[in-house]
Image: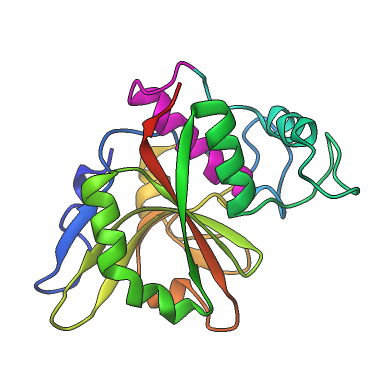
Amino acid sequence: HLGPFAKAHGIDGAKTYIMSGDFDYYHYGVGHNDGGWGCAYRSLQMVMSWYELAGLTDTKPLSILRIQENLFNMGVMDADFYVGCKQWIGSQEVSWLLDSVCGASSRFVVCTRGSEILEKSRELSQHFMEQQTPIVICGGKLALTLLGIAWNEQSGKVSFLIADPHYTGEDELNQVQSKTVSLEGYKAIPVSWRGAEAFTDRSSYTLCLPQRKCMI
């Protein structure tokens, strides 16, 4: 439930733009031992759950093995990819699965460095107003699910509402939304507002912006 996050971003004068509806929080260890490599699969599952809960698809989020099976059968992966491997996927693979399974197309926003994501605040706010879907961000060997932004257009300050798939603890609401825990080499509250420090200028990022309309 994202209601408590509507005004908790800490940026004076900011407008808040948050995805509509509900989603299921998927993270490391849910039905599969995927620590260290499965974060984009988890972000994909979160987005797939959004489409199901919004009534836009009858398909439940696929397991990691089913995701790999679909990608393998598409013939789009490299020769080292197989069902049961520990190979990362990224925004492109996320978009392929959303298209083939949910009938949902995606747009991409490519940022050559982390700070460039802040420069995309207008585009991101428009996405949350018009499409209202969660966004998958892949870069720096990490994937995150973006649920919304708080943006002060005058000052340029931005905060990002993140659902972090690198969490490994219990599915307990207070733990997920208020306790700082160790994640993938850093510490944060698993589902929380984060500043620009969530992204690094040492990495490029590709944002997958799923479109609301399904074609099936």
Q: Which residue is drawn at 18% across and 58% down?
A: 16
Does residue 67 appear to the left or right of 138 in the view shown?
A: right
Q: Which residue is drawn at 17% across and 83% down?
A: 155
Q: Can residue 169 be seen in this view?
A: no
Q: Quadrant of residue 184?
A: bottom right
Q: Quadrant of residue 205?
A: bottom right
Compared to residue 139, the image places residue 99 above or below, namely above
Q: Which stretch did the figure color magenta? A: 39-58
Compared to residue 78, the image places residue 206 above or below, namely below
Q: Is the magenta stretch mostly helix, strand or loop?
A: helix
Name the image quarter holding the N terminus.
top left
Does residue 136 appear to the left or right of 22 in the view shown?
A: right
Q: Residue at x 30, y 64 (%)?
A: 123
x, y percentage for residue 137? 50, 58
Name the image quarter holding the C terminus.
top left
The residue sitting at the front extreme is: 215
